[in-house]
Image (cartoon, rainbow, N blue to C red):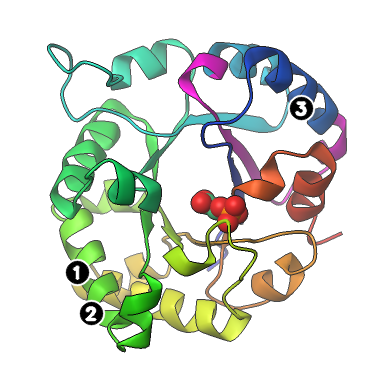
Amino acid sequence: MARKPIIAGNWKMNMTNEQAKVLIEGLKPLVKDAKKTEVVICVPYTDIATAVSLCAGSNIKVGAENVAWAEKGAFTGEISADMLLELGTEYVIIGHSERRQYFGETDSSVNARLKTAVAKGLKPIVCVGETLEQREKNRTKSVIRKQVTLGLADLSEEDILNTVIAYEPVWAIGTGKTATSEQAEETIKFIRGVIAKMYTRKIANKVRIQYGGSMNPKNVKELMAMPNIDGGLIGGASLKAEDFSLVVNFDK
Ligand code: PGA
C-alpha cells in the first residue's frame, strides 16, 4: 500500500514577496529531482500569487495556511476557498496548533473549515497534537482521539483519502525539541487506528499522516524510516532553500 511521501513547508508569518521570490528561485533547482515525494510550500496569502507563478511547471505545489468555513460575507480578516482557488492554491493547512493556541480555533471550527475545503476541492493538511502538559499527564491518546474524531468528522471516504493529517506535538514545534522517531511513530500509528475505526482499516492504510515539529535535515531520515510516517510539515527548516531541499531529498 504505497503512500506517496509528502513534505510540506509551513512558512507561517514569514517572507515578504521579495523574500519569497528569492527563496523559491533558490529552492526550485534543489528539489527538481524529487520524483517520489510530493513537495508543497504553504505560504502567507500575500505570497500565494507569486509562489504559484514561480512554481508553475515545477514539481512544487502551493498551499495556504488557513481557509474560512463560510463561502463569503462578513468575516473580516478571513479568506475564502474561492479566493485561494482563483490564485491556483492546491493545499491548505487547517487547525495548526498556533491557530488553536492564539486564535481560538477549536475542533468544531477545524471541522467546519475542513468541510468547506474538501467541498471546494482544496487538499487539506489537518494538524493535531498534544501539549507538553497533556503528554506529561498521559493524556496524549485521549487528546488526539478527540481532535481526530471531532476535527475530521463527517467526511466522505473520498474526502478522507484526499486529506493529509499532520501529527504535531505542540511541545516540539519551533522548540528544536523533536519527538523521537518512536514517539512520533507510536502516535501516528494510533491516529491511523482512530481513522480505521471511523472508516475502515483499508482506508486508514491509504491516508497520509505527516510528522511535524522541528523536523530538519538531521532527523528527517530516521523519522521517515518509520512505517507509519508519510512525510513532514516543516516550519523553521522550510525558510532556507538548502535546509528544506535536504528534508525533501531525505531519500537521496
Ligand atoms: P517547526 O514548525 O518545524 O518550526 O517546528 C512545524 C510546524 O509548526 O508546522
Question: Residue drawn at (41%, 10%), measured in percent from left and top?
Answer: 86
Q: Amino acid at mark 1?
A: Lys
In the rendered image of this protein, does residue 139 appear above or below residue 75? below
- From the viewer's perspective, tell me whether residue 14 is left or right of residue 141: right
| Label 2 or label 3, whichever comes before in sequence order | 3
Q: Which residue is mark 2?
A: 142
- From the viewer's perspective, tell me whether residue 100 is left or right of residue 242: left
From mark 2 to mark 3, how far is it between C-alphas? 39 Å
| Label 3 or label 1, whichever comes before in sequence order | 3
From mark 3 to mark 1, how far is it between C-alphas? 37 Å
Label 2 packing within 10 angstroms: few (<14), some (14-19), many (20+) = few
Q: Residue 135, can we see it?
A: yes
Residue 23, numbered circle: 3
Residue 30 on the magenta segment = yes
Q: Amino acid at mark 3?
A: Leu
Label 1 packing within 10 angstroms: few (<14), some (14-19), many (20+) = some
Quarter placement of the C terminus: bottom right
In the rendered image of this protein, does residue 124 appear above or below residue 54? below
Question: Residue drawn at (43%, 34%), measured in percent from left and top?
Answer: 65
Q: Which element carries disc 3, helix, strand or loop?
A: helix
- From the viewer's perspective, tell me whether residue 236 is left or right of residue 144: right
Residue 152 position, x and y percent, is 22, 55
Residue 146, numbered circle: 1
Residue 70 position, x and y percent, is 15, 24
Q: Which element carries disc 2, helix, strand or loop?
A: helix
Question: Mark 1–mark 2 contact, CB under 8 Å?
Answer: yes
- Ligand 1 contact, mark 1 (Cβ < 8 Å): no
- From the viewer's perspective, tell me whether residue 133 is left or right of residue 180: left
